[in-house]
Image (tube, grey):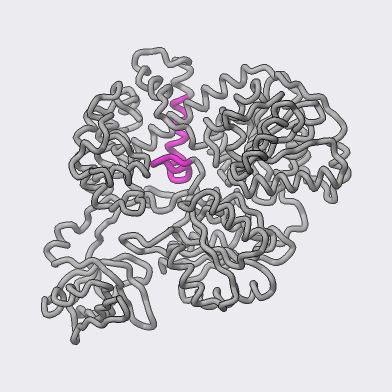
Amino acid sequence: MNSKSKNPSLIENISSLKGVGDKSRALFEKCNVRTVEDLLNYFPRDYDICGEIKNVSDLVSGEVAAVRVMAVGNPAVRHVRNLSILAFKAADSTGEMNVTFFNMPYMLGTVRGSGYFVLRGLVQKKGSSFCMEQPKYYKTEDYLEIMGSMQPKYPLVKGLSNNLVIKTMHQAIPVTAYMEDILSPSLKRELDLIDYPEAVRKIHFPENMEEFLKARKRIAFNEILLFILKLRFLKKEEEQSINNYPFKDEKETDRLISMLPYDLTNKQKQIWKDIKNDLMGEHIMNRLIQGDVGSGKTILAFLSLLCAAENGYQGAIMAPTEVLARQHYEGFMDMIEKYNLNMKPVLLIGSLTAKEKRLAQEGIENGAFDCIVGTNALIQEKVNYKNLSLVITDEQHRFGVLQREKLSEKGYMPHVLAMSATPIPRTLAIIMYGDLHISILDEMPGGRIPIKNCVVGTEYRNTAYKFIADQVKQGHQAYVICPMIEETEEGSSENVTEYTQKLRSALPKDIRIQTLHGKMKGQEKEKIMDMFGRGEIDVLVSTTVIEVGINVPNATVMMIENSERFGLAQLHQLRGRVGRGTAQSYCIFINTSGKEEAKNRLEIMNKSNDGFKIAEEDLKQRGPGDLFGIRQSGEMSFHVADIYQDAALIKEAAAYADRLLLEDPDLVFDENAPLKAALLANSFDFTAL
């Protein structure tokens, strides 16, 4: 992100580093790491902090802990099919625990008769006994050496080990000397920020928590400041843009509103009035509708598109997934036929055949279609619009500023309407959606049945399974969310791959269970979501990939494993996948940590279905001790910064950005040259919004 005119050491391919051959290079490339600079900007997702040694009697189920024990009894290896199992009891002066190693028969000689040793791993409770499976083994003196240290844990792809990333990173660290600092010395002193190269070194290998927090603060500030400055320049440019598509207040939208089987809420009426004023005003519209799941954003989008068609213009709505795009298209078609509306929609998504795409593109170019519904396919080079006057992005936080700009460029400065169900506190939304006028849709339509919630421990799982089976028997469907795709080195959370197998054993054989995760190919994901939507899958075991873009009114149960690992706002987004039909819906939050603190935090979900209240609580509860452990997937996807944890930093960065632009509106002063260069650099990715 910040390099002195790309010093040769920074732009070297990572294959120049020792131990990175063709195979390793290909794995790094899957993580978008190609150069040494890319590697240095590949920040840890978390840290493994080797805590103090605990007594067996003080262990807590769900925690990763270290104990100093010795093997008791007579450890032995047994074989089950192709699996070797070493199971034995280990004890200290306070109690006993069960230990199991799989396919590690050599550990028998290590633990037998060797006196005391340290085991570190995930603690589980089975019956009345604590147990560890596949823990790490240390000699006592070796563990004491690393106790208290912070070992980085990196995002990995299959085949790429954390150890290889660490070894490669150690080689790259000296090159941080060539990374440029974009902030002036005076600002760093004012905000107590360390130098950028130092921050990069210390975020990878902090010696203690204090070092980590200083490094994280500096890198987060860089990300936030550049982001806010980009938005300020966008807003300045757009506020000066004259409305090239002046709308007239046609009557077709009024006719539709009068025929709807429900009344618009007061908030919907107010926002619709604001949208019409924007469309008929002197300058182009740049508006965000921020509203909870089910608050009625889609009808406002449809009214806006209908208004564009009435005025002889084209409008486009871009959704983050094909499933959501198709749902919008089918919903629009139903309303057009039901209310006899003069509007011609077309669906443009990647999975269409070549002929279907060609016909859609031809109709878009010659104006035969005036409402274009799709995904990223809307911004492909081959798509040309006749008179695109309105661009709508659904689930705004899933699209980058660049994507929105790219769609806008398909027309001649069209109006922009963005929609988001991500509940962000208003104070932060004003900053983070800085180039948009914000409309808060915080009034829910009547008639919705509130979701029933419960926060439970792991001992409730079997009861939850029976409840899911009962709901399926009644003709409904269920989601089960796990935070991971497959087992990791530490193995401390549920993963969809193994969980699917576990669920198939626990539920009746006639229940159809399928897996869904983000690493699947796009078409495979769309197929599974489509099958679930059509009722051909009863239980979907998924990562947070279903957070947006799937609307299945028949799904009545959402069960979230390891729910303490998610931010409250994201849990609310996940919960929003149920409660969309006429039947009572339920959300089960499984707290696997066993910690009272996590239980209290999750109780907020138990007590409220209001996304904005939950977002405010999330904001209050964040602290520096969260590290990267609780992240909001998808929203404002910075590498390090987090909109909840860094709320104070966001306000500082916004205040500084405003002051800076007041003194130097075009960043022409010498001391601001590095900042301007970073803003203009192609390598900077403004996809956080």
Camera-side residue: 583 or 341?
341
Point out residue 635 in the picture as x, y percentages from the top left corner: 51, 44
Residue 105 located left or right of residue 581: left
Residue 266 located left or right of residue 392: right
Q: Can you tell which quarter of the image residue 681 is in?
A: top left
Identity of the residue furthest to the bottom in this view? 73
Q: Tell me if residue 614 can be seen.
A: no
- Residue 496 vertical position relative to residue 102 in the rendered view, above or below: above
Q: Can you tell which quarter of the image residue 283 is in?
A: top right
Does residue 652 belong to the magenta stretch? yes
Q: How many marks?
A: 0
Camera-side residue: 7 or 673?
7
Point out residue 654 in the picture as x, y percentages from the top left corner: 47, 30
Q: Tell me if residue 375 can be seen.
A: yes
Point out residue 595 in the picture as x, y percentages from the top left corner: 41, 66
Point out residue 646 in the picture as x, y percentages from the top left corner: 43, 41
The part of the chain drawn in magenta is: 637-657
Residue 665 located left or right of residue 137: right
Q: Which residue is located at x 32 percent, y 68 percent?
A: 122
- Residue 628 vertical position relative to residue 286 in the rendered view, above or below: below
Q: Can you tell which quarter of the image residue 414 is in?
A: top right
Residue 596 located left or right of residue 328: left
Identity of the residue furthest to the front in this view? 355
Q: Quadrant of the N terminus?
A: top left
Q: Which residue is located at x 27 percent, y 46 percent?
A: 24
- Residue 181 vertical position relative to residue 129 in the rendered view, above or below: above
Q: Which residue is located at x 20 percent, y 39 percent?
A: 17
Q: Which residue is located at x 78 percent, y 45 percent?
A: 333
Does residue 464 belong to the magenta stretch? no
